[in-house]
Image (cartoon, rainbow, N blue to C red):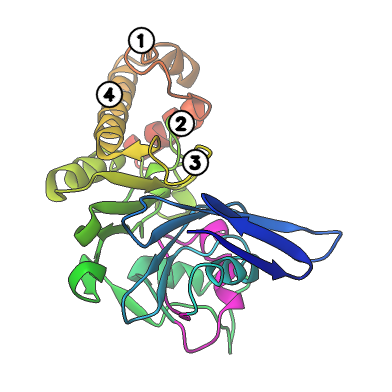
Amino acid sequence: MLRTMTLGGLTTAALVALAVTGGTAQEDRTVAMQSLDVRENLYVISGGGGHTAALVTENDGVVLVDTKLAGWGQPILKTVLLITDQPVTLIINTHTHGDHVGGNLDFPANVEIVAHEATATRMRSMAPFAGAGAVGLPDRTFTDRLTLLQGKDQIDLYHFGAGHTDGDTVVVFPGIGMAHLGDLFAVMGTPYIDVANGGSGVAYPDTLDRIVASIDGIRRVIPGHIPPPTGSPIRDWTTWANVEEYARFNRDFLDSVRASKAAGRSVDDAVAALDLQTRYPSYTMDRAAANVQAIYDELDGR
């Protein structure tokens, strides 16, 4: 596919990747779109927050998964226009954080928004969605599972329990063997456990184990924030094997913290005792102390 289009004075030639800049000169907002597979109509849009997935359906318009930070909806819309004339008809939010739902505000009111019921509840109490007349909130919610569309365009939504937050949604495209995990699988390393929004370090490994045990046939995964490699289609990104390894990492992390708690170790000593770098040499550990503290507090019932 090769298209050349001009948007606001910017000419973009699209062969393997697309980029669109929006906003003012003082506040440029640039996103890049890359295809995951030349055989499929699923794309990832990076920049401006968490990764957005864009599914161009056969007859039901464009489905977006997550909409980035507030003000980034227009760059998403302009980028989608480079590959299709179909309108955005559906948005799925994987969880409540502003870098995944903020762009909701830029979309027309007739675009349906779907999220887990806990995500919708938390969004109603956060700026800029709180208050009477608020827009960009979910129109439809689910508890455990919801199927949208049909055939090759079918989308299955799952909630397996608390982890990053208490409303994390796993978005599966079964017809093409791909999934978007949002920030349940944000980085290759210690996750962000948002206790204030129902996240749980104790439940996290159980949630990931249920995902791995319950979902089959997934080849490729869109993570929350792992940078995609240059080029399109993206052949060297994250796979289901990475999710399985991530589940083992979080189980090993929790087991080590439980053992340290039972031994009466301090948080700092528990971090020192983790000894995970040999088994997971490429994993970052920057949130190790915060996560140990969160798990200690949870085990104490605080």
Q: Nearer the viewer, mark 3 or mark 1?
A: 3
Kindly give the residue lying farthest to the right in the view shown: 26
* Distance in Å between CA atoms under marks 1 and 4: 12 Å
Looking at the image, can residue 266 be seen? yes
Q: Which residue is mark 4?
A: 252
Q: Nearer the viewer, mark 4 or mark 3?
A: 3
Q: Residues within 10 Å of mark 3 (few under 14, many from 20)?
A: many
Percent from the top left, x then y, of residue 171?
Answer: 31, 59
| Foreground residue among 261 and 257 | 257
Q: Nearer the viewer, mark 2 or mark 3?
A: 3
Q: Amino acid at mark 3?
A: Pro
Q: Earlier in the sequence, mark 4 or mark 3?
A: 3
Q: Which residue is mark 2?
A: 293
* Distance in Å between CA atoms under marks 2 and 1: 23 Å
* Distance in Å between CA atoms under marks 4 and 2: 16 Å
Q: Earlier in the sequence, mark 3 or mark 1?
A: 3
Residue span colored magenta: 86-111
Q: Please give the count of numbered marks on the rendered protein.
A: 4
Q: Which residue is mark 1?
A: 278
Percent from the top left, x then y, of residue 237?
Answer: 40, 37
Q: Earlier in the sequence, mark 2 or mark 3?
A: 3
Q: Which residue is mark 3?
A: 228
Q: Earlier in the sequence, mark 1 or mark 4?
A: 4
Q: Are marks 2 and 1 in contact (CB under 8 Å)?
A: no
Secondary structure found at label 1: loop
Snapshot quadrant of residue 200 = top left
Percent from the top left, x then y, of residue 256?
Answer: 30, 20
